[in-house]
Amino acid sequence: MECRVLSIQSHVVRGYVGNKSATFPLQVLGFEVDSINSVQFSNHTGYGHWKGQVLTAEELNVLYEGIKLNNVNHYDYILTGYSRDISFLETVVDIIKELKKANPSLVYVCDPVMGDQGAMYVPENLLPVYKNKVVPLADILTPNQFEAELLTGRKINTEEDAIEVMDLLHKMGPETVVLTSTDLPSKQGDQFLVALGSQKIKKPDGTNTDQKICMDIPKVDAVFVGTGDLFAALMLAWTHQHPKDLKTACEKTVSVMHHVIKRTITYANEMAGPGKRPTPAQLELRMVQSKADIENPAIVVEAKLLQKSSQ
């Protein structure tokens, strides 16, 4: 069966962020990807300069109308990332509702991009829209620790807190929640960061079970852009392949990330030369060069099962 994804994210002429980060891996893994570009910039905003255009809510509506008029608005997945405009986000919500009505088994993968390390980088008035309108529609949610704390109003200081926050997020709507990065200490030392995941599964007899996992991911000393967008796209792909096995889906996702990032930092350091910090241009993800790893990743990070409880 052909699988079609509607991806509403940013676009850059050069480099990898938003749709540029998500489209290639999804296509390589066999998905048809229809992209709506929420912005079109020359490059990501971590460079010294950038230029470009922003798609308005009205323009988003016009594009969706065109798809609808031709009766090709049937999707299996929706993927969304960074948005900084409230009316744009509310239009996205309307589109998702309509597409879910047309196909009740549609899966919405949401990366609720709002901030990191205790600081919001979108307007604060987007939080209630995410909380009350976006997250309840999501099936798979991939926040970082700060975004999960914003959405639930709870702080994460321990693994128990993280489990509680994931359960609160489940109550808001999503069946699968992955905390893509946390500040929790890794048992493997300070060269690792901890990510956690939780999946609610309905058993044939109608009872619920859940799978909770924890991963120690090797840290890399550099700032990459587009990794969150890549993570969400890979979660979409691997949960599609392994719908009731969060452990395997996360291992494959994180392993692809590791291979891409390792290839990128090796290349960037070579280009920069000894003792020099790589530039944003040199640190663009080595996506095309990682095609084989995206298709068939060697597993380098193992997920540990935390608990499996029936309810």
Image: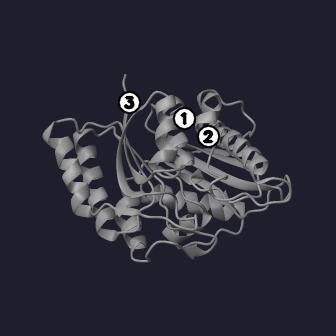
Mark 1 element type:
helix
Give the residue number, with chain letter if any, for mark 1: 238
Mark 3 and mark 1: span between their CA atoms? 13 Å
Give the residue number, with chain letter if any, for mark 3: 3
Instruction: Please tell me which residue is depicted at 64% across the width and 61% down the height of the picture.
Output: 162
How is the rendered protein coloured?
one colour
209 relative to 258 in the view: left or right: left
10 relative to 235 in the view: left or right: left
164 relative to 259 in the view: left or right: left
Indicate whether 256 appears above or below 277. above
Q: Please state which amino acid type lies under the numbered disc 3.
A: Cys
Mark 2 and mark 1: span between their CA atoms? 7 Å
Residue 153: image x %, image y %? Answer: 53, 73
Please report whichever mark, 3 or 1, sits nearer to the chain's N-terminal start: 3
Please report whichever mark, 3 or 2, sits nearer to the chain's N-terminal start: 3
Q: Which mark is residue 253?
A: 2
Indicate whether 149 appears above or below 107. below
Q: Is residue 10 visible?
A: yes
Residue 120: image x %, image y %? Answer: 53, 74
Instruction: Please tell me which residue is depicted at 46% across the width and 72% down the height of the picture.
Output: 122
Q: Which mark is residue 301?
A: none
Closer-to-camera residue (50/248): 50
Mark 3 element type:
loop
Residue 127: image x %, image y %? Answer: 43, 71
Please report whichever mark, 2 or 1, sits nearer to the chain's N-terminal start: 1
Q: Are marks 2 and 1 in contact (CB under 8 Å)?
A: yes
Closer-to-camera residue (45/262): 45
Indicate whether 289 appears above or below 197. above
